Image (cartoon, grey):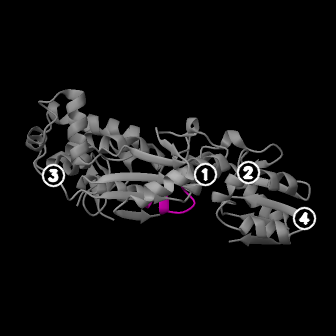
Amino acid sequence: MPSIEVDGKTYETDEEGYLTNLADWNKEIANYIAQTENINMTEQHWEVINFLREYFEEYQIAPAVRVLTKAIGKKLGPEKGNSEYLYSLFPYGPGKQACKIGGLPKPTGCV
Amino acid sequence: MLHIINKSPLTNSALDSCLRVAQSGEILLIEDAVYAATSGNAFEGKIREAMGRFRIYVLQPDLDARGLADRIIEGVLPVDYGGFVELTTTNKTCQSWL
Amino acid sequence: MSNIKKFMFVNRKAPHGTIYALEALEVVLITAAFDQDVSLVFLDDGVYQLKKGQQTKGIETKNFSSAYRALEGYDIEKLYVEKESLEARGLGEEDLLVDVTVLGRAEMGELMDQQDVVLSF
């Protein structure tokens, strides 16, 4: 099994780098994964990560990008609920990258 | 003797077969068979009837998973995994009606 | 927009005991991306998939029942439950974790006849 090492501790991931145990997640791990994805975490990034984690808590799934975009628009306003904004934060896909950083599984239907 | 059922009584004949063949003993309902232990289910009458001949148990974690812990038919005995193991050891033989 | 087809997913299995319910749900969530006219039907033991209050900690599996509540966000709003199936299981609309349309078996049959694609689970 692949793994990552953060602060001297080892965490198991899948072959694509998603955490195996959702309960392992913490902010240090998030920052570490973000670094490996070449993302510099800002308040705007955290806003999306936190939103995703809340969504997952409620529905036990990671939303498809389209659903995420719509839901963010509803909660944080239209200037944030559009793919241009979300891709500017997570260039390789808000679902894919944000879920990985947030310690969530890859969204269903995401290839 | 212990009889174990793991299929819903409304879509599979395993429990019916068990009740037709077996005369007495203990029945443990697990997995999708726990629906048979819930009141309001169309099988309830047959379970009540069978309680005269059998002691009927239901696996609590499977009932919880299906959101039916509050529907258990009176007289059906809930067991946890420890109770499951105990039933398999206190009975000399065990038939799983797969 | 003439290439929109009517897709129906027919769910007839109880959750947790077999993998059918979870697999169906995953296919439905993926299908949602294709903007088709999707209906979900719950028949026989399939109605148990929508039972409120499922707690899967004890059997150590994913509690995917919460995901049915996410369907609305995926624009999947046509959920139909057969009345006779509910009644045979001592359940009513108030026992279900999402809003559904309850149909009698004849209406359900008609609805099935109107589909372009029917997928069975």
Q: Nearer the viewer, mark 1 or mark 3?
A: 1
Queried whether the magenta region covers residue C120, the answer comes back as no
**Chain letter for mark 3:** A
Give the residue pinned by disc 2.
Answer: B37
Sequence order check, earlier mark of 2 and 4 = 4
Q: Mark 4, residues whose alpha carbon is within 10 Å: few (<14), some, or many (≥20)?
A: some
Quadrant in the rendering for residue A43: top left
Residue C105: percent from left, percent from top: 56, 53
Give the residue pinned by disc 1.
Answer: C85
Residues at marks 1 and 3 touching, judged by CB atoms closer than 8 Å: no
Q: Mark 3, residues whose alpha carbon is within 10 Å: few (<14), some, or many (≥20)?
A: few
Residue C75 seen anywhere in this rendered image of the structure: yes
Residue C78: percent from left, percent from top: 39, 46
Mark 2 vs mark 1, CA separation in Å = 17 Å
Same subunit under labels 1 and 4? Answer: no
Give the residue pinned by disc 4.
Answer: B24
Q: Secondary structure at mark 3?
A: helix
Q: Nearer the viewer, mark 2 or mark 3?
A: 2
| Above or below, comparing residue A86 to residue B2 in the picture | above
**Chain letter for mark 1:** C
* Mark 1 residue type: Ser
Quadrant in the rendering for residue B53: bottom right
